[in-house]
Amino acid sequence: MTCWSAWEERTCYWPVRGTDIVAVSDFSFQRADGGTGNSDTLRLDGTGLTLDLASNVRRRLHGFEQIDITGTGNNVLTVTARQVLGLSDTSNTLTVIGNSGDVVHRGTGWTSGGTTMIDGATYNVFTQGAATLNIHQDIADDELEAPSQITLSSNTVREFALDGAPIGTLDAVDGNSGDTFTFTLIDDAGGLLEIF
């Protein structure tokens, strides 16, 4: 379908009935509307595409509950909680479909809510206020999460222990898969403690 703006002819995508999939290979369209269903999808068909919902392209999108950034190569999506809440009239949840090589920039303030299964695939769940963001587990999520659950397996030392005797093992949980940890002592008790 063709729309006219004051300056030029542009493409518009309007909803049909039911679940709509709107495929775009660039962002030159005037308007894309998924309609009022609960699983309407904006699909990126291409490679090297960066969809930044904070840019003016956001004002041209409406009625989408899913964004598929799989494409034919690596694509990027930038989204905040405010944009998740404004993208659909029927849902406060955005599900991002993609694969290895794709990246989501989700901004700060999200709380990790574990994982969920959608259509047989695992998604990492993030919430911020009323907004929920489901990101396919294969998509790189570049927002760093602080390690949590830092533990020391033991906190006692045997009386008359020799220098270098181990006290315990440090461990932590990190929401960023594949990360490693480096621990540093802030106070080494006058040289009596060290991490090795």
Image (cartoon, rainbow, N blue to C red):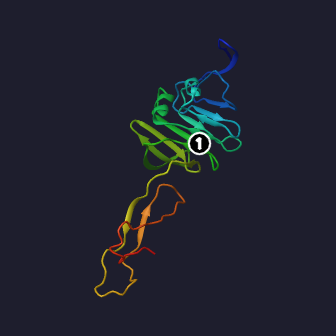
Q: Does any portion of residue 1 appear in the rendered image?
A: no
- Residue drawn at x 30%, y 77% is 156
Quarter holding the N terminus?
A: top right
| Residue 143 x/y as whole percent | 51, 48
Q: Mark 1 is on which residue type?
A: Ile
- Residue drawn at x 61%, y 41% is 76
| Residue 99 x/y as whole percent | 63, 47
Q: Does any portion of residue 28 appear in the rendered image?
A: yes
How many numbered marks have been drawn onto this rendered protein structure?
Answer: 1
Answer with left or right where residue 183 lies relative to residue 77.
Answer: left
User: Is 79 rendered above or below residue 172?
Assistant: above
Q: Secondary structure at mark 1?
A: strand
User: Is 15 rendered above or below residue 4?
Assistant: below
Pick whichever, 73 or 68, lies toward us.
Answer: 73
Residue found at the far top of this picture = 6
| Residue 192 x/y as whole percent | 35, 78
Residue found at the far front of this picture = 190
Answer with left or right where residue 150 lies relative to residue 136.
Answer: left
> Could you say which quadrant of the image residue 159 lies in?
bottom left
Pick whichever, 135 or 169, lies toward us.
Answer: 169
CA neighbours of label 1 inside 10 A, class few (<14), some (14 to 19), many (20+): many
| Residue 36 x/y as whole percent | 52, 25
User: Is 37 rendered above or below residue 158?
Assistant: above
Pick whichever, 174 or 190, lies toward us.
Answer: 190
Q: Which residue is mark 1?
A: 97
- Residue drawn at x 62%, y 40% is 69
> Could you say which quadrant of the image residue 189 lies in?
bottom left
Pick whichever, 135 or 4, lies toward us.
Answer: 4
